[in-house]
Image (cartoon, rainbow, N blue to C red):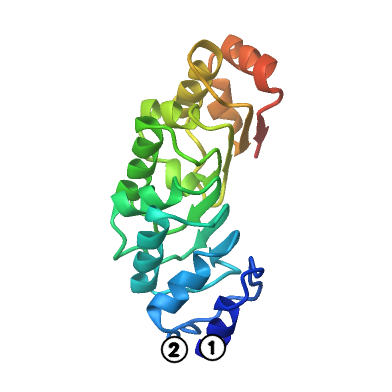
Amino acid sequence: MHDLFKLVHEIPTVRRISGSSCKNCFSAVEPDLLVSVLNSFEELHIGSSGMDLTSKQMKLLFTAMSVETNVESLYLCGNCDLSETSPVLLASAISNVKNVTFGVFNVRLQHVQALFSAIIAEDKLLTKLKVSTCSTVKVDPVILGRALNRLEEVTIYRNDAETIRSDQISAIISILVDGETKLKVLRLLELRAADIEEVDQDLIRRAREKVGEFYTIF
């Protein structure tokens, strides 16, 4: 595997590697080489159906990405080990990428809050975010609404028993229809009927007028 990464490092036209997840496959690769290769890709999958990295490898990768990266599409899904990655570092790395799918099962609230706070604080490269309900369920509605309206395309999908709450929906679409927003596409997938029924229906109508049908019912 180390020899393979040495070869890939010498081929500047390689922009992605596809393959199934493999536990500890990359332990033999020298850390700086591993990070250099992964950070040079345009598309990077980590976790489910992607590269299975250790907590130390994740920290090194995000440290490099927070400074500069060629990654344009980042997929973080499944049981990614972020135990050695600080919330601030994760936020800095993710917000440096244009298109991010964030569906980590065991993510801490501090990591998610740091990401949304970074989005609110200043303009970032991140414009398109797909995030799971297990990552957003405990986030303050005001913070969630302000952060998502700083992006151009947002998808929140259900991957566990939790769905996005009615107060979070209200916060997002209130800013969408009445405040400063960059949102052009909003998708809230597999909501509970009860949650969407608790939202002001005039607010929902006005949101539909701006972005079209923006939710589906589980």
Residue 26 vertical placement versus 81 (above, below): below
Choose top left, top right, bottom left or bottom right for residue 83.
Answer: bottom left
Which numbered disc, 2 or 1, marks the residue that appears first in the sequence?
Answer: 1
Choose top left, top right, bottom left or bottom right for residue 193.
Answer: top right
- Residue 69, given in percent of the width and then of the height, sits at 48, 56
- The residue where tag 2 is placed is 28
Residue 171 vertical placement versus 91 (above, below): above
- Residue 190, given in percent of the width and then of the height, sits at 63, 40
Q: Amino acid at mark 1?
A: Met
Residue at 60%, 60% (x, y): give it.
43
Residue 125 vertical placement versus 178 (above, below): below
Q: Nearer the viewer, residue 203 or 17?
A: 17
Residue at 65%, 40% (x, y): give it.
218
Residue at 43%, 55% (x, y): give it.
68
Q: Are marks 2 and 1 in contact (CB under 8 Å)?
A: yes
Neighbourhood count class around disc 2 (C-alpha, 10 Å): few under 14, some 14–19, many 20 upward:
few
Find numbered disc 1 in the image and state the secondary structure of the residue it sits on. loop
Label placed on residue 213 = none
Q: Nearer the viewer, residue 214 or 101?
A: 101
Q: Nearer the viewer, residue 171 or 22?
A: 22
Q: Amino acid at mark 2?
A: Ala
Residue at 67%, 34% (x, y): give it.
216
Find numbered disc 2 in the image and state the secondary structure of the residue it sits on. loop
Choose top left, top right, bottom left or bottom right for residue 8.
Answer: bottom right
- Residue 32, given in percent of the width and then of the height, sits at 39, 76
- The residue where tag 1 is placed is 1
Neighbourhood count class around disc 1 (C-alpha, 10 Å): few under 14, some 14–19, many 20 upward:
few
How far separated are the C-alphas under marks 2 and 1?
Answer: 7 Å
Which quadrant holds the N terminus? bottom right
Residue 60 vertical placement versus 179 (above, below): below
